[in-house]
């Protein structure tokens, strides 16, 4: 049953990240997920200081607040300081991440807060915190939270698909027609923040960024239809979660690391295949 809990948790993270990551890949902003997942440390520290507890709710609120702050800082640097978005992301997240590490290492030594968990997660231990669902059926607390977030993300993207799509692919047209680009930008960033914050505790920041970038990039290589890309990204995320877990079990290595490696391997295979097919088409055309 522990295998089922781990795979289900990884698959839920994969779906959430694939949906948000598809928009980020097309907007060339995928590294903002990495920024947010690293920038949660100060929020975690202050949540512990204020609440005196490391329970999920205050930590989640603190991490979400820090993630939103990171998004605002990145946008402020981009708009006001006229920095490129990648430079704004790099400056913002390294600053917040460094502040978080300093605070936790200096003042959080007596608390059960480990900055390494933010990087690598605790996917192998999700079954330690089970909650009753129906009768004798239990699910890990983190899996339940991820399931709720998955429903929220799917409903939000379904509702706002047209606005997200237009502002992603044709921002100039959006401006000319009076569509509120700022609203849809922060709408997307809120979803990204929610996704990364609830995911980092289980799978860690490294696997979050792998899920945000890998499956959408694989799907992008295979189709030019964005709706198909969303579906394919989710499918590849689930596939990589399952294969990565059993690979980790076989080799006795980190689950998060194995899943990330599988994502990279599948991307490489798809890239080689699609590149060779494109080369053949170019030769025929010539």
Image: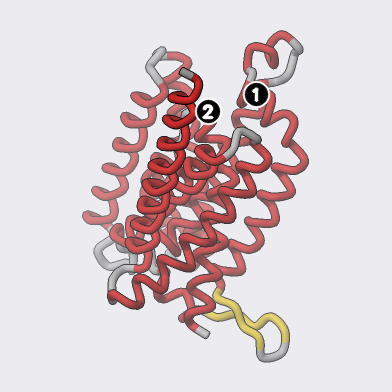
Residue 106's tag is none
- What element does badge 1 sit on? helix
Number of on-image labels? 2
Q: Residue at x 69, y 56 (%)?
A: 151
- What element does badge 2 sit on? helix
Residue picked out by circle 2 = 27
Query: Which of the two residues, 274 or 250, is positioned nearer the viewer here?
Result: 274
Q: Position of residue 62 (x, y in %)?
A: 48, 51
Q: CA distance from mark 1 to mark 2?
A: 9 Å
Query: Which of the two residues, 278 or 201, is positioned nearer the viewer here?
Result: 278
Q: Quadrant of residue 82?
A: top left
232 left or right of 243 in image: right
Mark 2 surroundings within 10 Å by alpha-carbon count, few (fewer than 14), some (14 through 19), many (20 or more): few
Query: Which of the two residues, 134 or 8, is positioned nearer the viewer here?
Result: 8
Q: Is residue 59 visible?
A: yes
Query: Which of the two residues, 234 or 83, is positioned nearer the viewer here?
Result: 234
Residue picked out by circle 1 = 167
């Amino acid at each position: 049953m522990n295998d089922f809990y781990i795979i289900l948790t990884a698959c839920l993270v994969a779906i959430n990240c694939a949906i948000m990551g598809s928009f980020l890949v097309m907007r060339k902003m995928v590294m903002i997920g990495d920024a947010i997942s690293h920038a949660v440390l100060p929020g975690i520290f202050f949540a512990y200081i204020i609440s005196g507890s490391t329970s999920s709710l205050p930590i989640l609120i603190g991490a979400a607040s820090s993630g939103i702050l990171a998004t605002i800082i990145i946008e402020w640097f981009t708009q006001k300081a006229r920095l490129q978005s990648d430079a704004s992301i790099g400056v913002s997240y390294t600053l917040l991440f460094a502040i978080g590490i300093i605070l936790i290492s200096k003042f959080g030594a007596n608390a059960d807060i480990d900055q390494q968990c933010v990087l690598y997660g605790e996917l192998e231990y999700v079954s330690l915190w089970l909650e009753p669902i129906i009768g004798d059926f239990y699910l890990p607390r983190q899996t339940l939270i991820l399931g709720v977030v998955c429903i929220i993300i799917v409903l939000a993207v379904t509702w706002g698909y047209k606005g997200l799509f237009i502002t992603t692919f044709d921002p100039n047209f959006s401006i000319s027609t009076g569509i509120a680009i700022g609203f849809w930008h922060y709408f997307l960033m809120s979803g990204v923040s929610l996704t990364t914050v609830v995911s980092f505790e289980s799978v860690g920041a490294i696997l979050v960024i792998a899920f945000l970038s890998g499956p959408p990039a694989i799907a992008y290589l295979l189709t030019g239809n964005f709706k198909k890309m969303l579906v394919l990204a989710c499918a590849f995320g689930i596939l990589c979660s399952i294969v990565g877990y059993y690979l980790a079990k076989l080799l006795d290595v980190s689950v998060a690391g194995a899943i990330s490696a599988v994502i990279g391997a599948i991307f490489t295979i798809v890239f080689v295949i699609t590149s060779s097919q494109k080369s053949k088409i170019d030769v025929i055309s010539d």
